Amino acid sequence: MTTLKNFWQFITDTLRIILKGDRLYYAWVGFLVLLIAIGAAAYLGQLNNGLIVTKMRDQVSWGFYIGNFTFLVGVAAAAIMLVIPAYIYDWEPIKEITILGEMLAISALIMCLGFVMVDIGRPDRFWHIIPLVGRLNWPQSMLAWDVIVLNLYLLLNWFVVTYLLFCAYTERHYVKKLVLPLVLLSIPMAVSIHTVTAYLYNGLAARPFWNSAILAPRFLASAFCSGPAILLILLQILRKTTKLTIKDEAIFKVAELMAYTMGFNLFLTAAEAFKELYSGTEHMVYFQYLLFGLKGHTTLVPYAWASILCGLAAFILFLVPRTRTNWVTLNIGCVLIYASVYIEKGMGLIIPGLTPDVLGDIYVYRPSFTEIAVAAGIFATGFLVFTLMLKAAVPMMLGEFTISKGQPPQAVPPREV
Amino acid sequence: MTDPKPTMPPESCGGSSCGTRREFLGAATAAMAAALTGCGTLSKEEFLQRNFRELSKQEVLDVIARLEKEYKAKYGKDVKVANTPAIPGVIFGYALDLSRCIGCRRCVHACVKENNQSRDPEVQWIRVLQMDKEEGVNLQHADQYYNPEEVPQEGHFYMPVQCQQCKKPPCTKVCPVGATWREKDGIVVVDYNWCIGCRYCMAACPYGARHFNWGEPNLPADQVNTNTHYLGNRPRPKGVVEKCTFCIQRTRNGQYPACVEICPTGSRKFGNLLDKDSEIRYVLENKRVFKFKEDLNTQPNFFYFYGV
């Protein structure tokens, strides 16, 4: 009963804390809300007119939305990059930041679900996909699998984060017997969400660009590059703006792990490119469209090479210990690898998978204004969720904001800790 | 117009039958969904309609009555929505003679007319590929947009592609909600009232046979074909996928598909694969046929052959 009461107080106090902030906080939140409003207005137009306001057509039937979805599944999966060393090896410096990784996963998953929702033609029939209520075509459809694992992963992360924060708030130590199995479960879950998302494309024999056995390993390798890159930058910001102490050691350790995954990611990409280009079958056309252009259509070419060059440069910066431990070069490396994977696992995956189409037609796809505005709105939603979670979580993690300290002092009698 | 106007959904009635909690919730959700999705005309019945394969006989009749009423209101015509089931002992097969086809695209347009596709933008279930004779069937040398004064063009042959009605359809396998399936007579159909418009089937189809209603289908009232089938050519809403059904509304009543009937060169052969004496069986027996993209093991019931 007291737990329930405490939880209610936890909720109200959390709400209180996210409503209060300095000017910079309000400006940032206001900016995000503005972007969300723009996205919502654009989406309303899409609802009224149909997906015809996008540049997607029968030939390229998935585009910017699904590209972003795929990339963000990788970001969500990458939370485990931090969880593995923290809990398996009981490595303390990273342990305190895993909760940040999990919050990042929650935000990324919310964006993922948003991108799927805006991509479907009949959002009013959303309930058809809800297990037991609708008619989920499981286990046949990989999309049905994806719906299940994404939502379970979201639920799992949401529960762990809420539980850990609630414990911190009520000044209790979390029950290790409860948290550890859940956190350990989140490791295979993270692998599974990205594997299933890869299989979603992988299983389509009609699309040779996706129908490659190393697609899922490539998904995982690239996710473990881009996800931690976001976190590294975030950790530095939090160190500066809050009292959260994050040791240099932790950051450099994550950077070192990233160097290995980047190397592996480049290797897998090269393996794929070699197989396609050297054997030179008719399946080569998709790689050709991506890397060199096809029949005069070269829209993707600059992006593809930018992605490769950024990936290579970031790998070198992270591999060399001196540049890895230098803040300037480290952050440049983070931005480069993020950009590289964003191109590779977004449009660089979806568009050449569909171009040329199954009948050899080349339709040049570029996202419309509506697509960009809606995507901006969804990204802003994700950032807003993350900001609000951080706003409440950081003081709780620091022990600054607890059930005793959160209340007016006179209301609480002094208590033993 | 003598059409009675029971257009108001039952939740607004004053009788005693309405007002159950379930109905109220259903109506509320439908209204909310309508408001949220910009589908202003979405009724409670439409919103709550279940997958076609789960409907009882009576529910199917109710749905059809509702659709016919909607079409009447929209087009001012009595559109008949049939629900003819597959004929026992029939599996439809199709064969196309590549040596006869001249690429005139009459099939394309007859199909659009018969099947109530959107006119602008025009959705075409048949795509005719102009191929180089020197290259054979090579999609990297295929042109869908050929537009000369006269066909056939020197040095080219023509290959129409439409749904291949696969025995192992990759499109139905991937659908997350089971909105598309293969009927007993081999026709792959879509429940336009259950499809969520995710377009996964379009990514999965190796033949480009699936088409999406990107906008509100533009079907002028005077061009509506009123002889329709629930799983076939009835007018579609926006945001759902559609495809060739071998003219299910015709073929289940013993008629040829529109494309077979219109073809001026007799390139198109259609019939019952289970009937030894059918023309399709004659073609399979006496001509050498091939299946398009055979390596994908989709096992089409649509064959190509060289008749001369």
Image (tube, coloured by chain):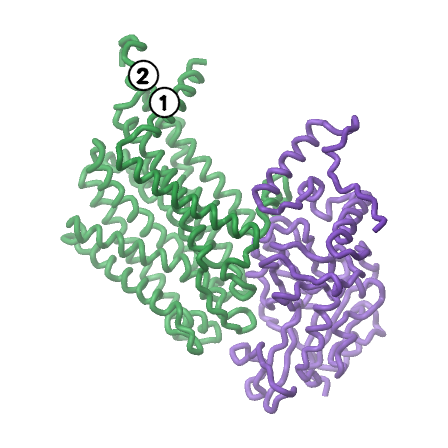
Give the class, few, some or many, for how many residues have Cα within 10 Å of label 1's Cα (few <14, many ≥20): some
The chain letter corresponding to purple is B
Residue at image location 80% in from the left, 70% down from the top? B256
Where's residue A85, x and y in %?
29, 40
Give the class, few, some or many, for how many residues have Cα within 10 Å of label 2's Cα (few <14, many ≥20): few
Which residue is labeled 2 in the image?
A: A407
| Left or right, A122 with reference to A36 | right
Callout 2 secondary element: loop
Mark number displayed over residue B180? none
In this view, the residue in front, B91 or B76, is: B76
- The answer to whether the residue labelled 2 contacts the one labelled 1, judged by CB atoms less than 8 Å apart, is yes
Residue B245 higher or lower than A284, as above or below: above
The chain letter corresponding to green is A
Mark number displayed over residue A13? 1
Quarter of the image with the C terminus of chain A is top left
Which amino acid, by three-letter code, is at mark 2?
A: Gln
| Left or right, B64 with reference to B150 | right
Label 1 marks which chain's residue? A
Which amino acid, by three-letter code, is at mark 1?
A: Asp
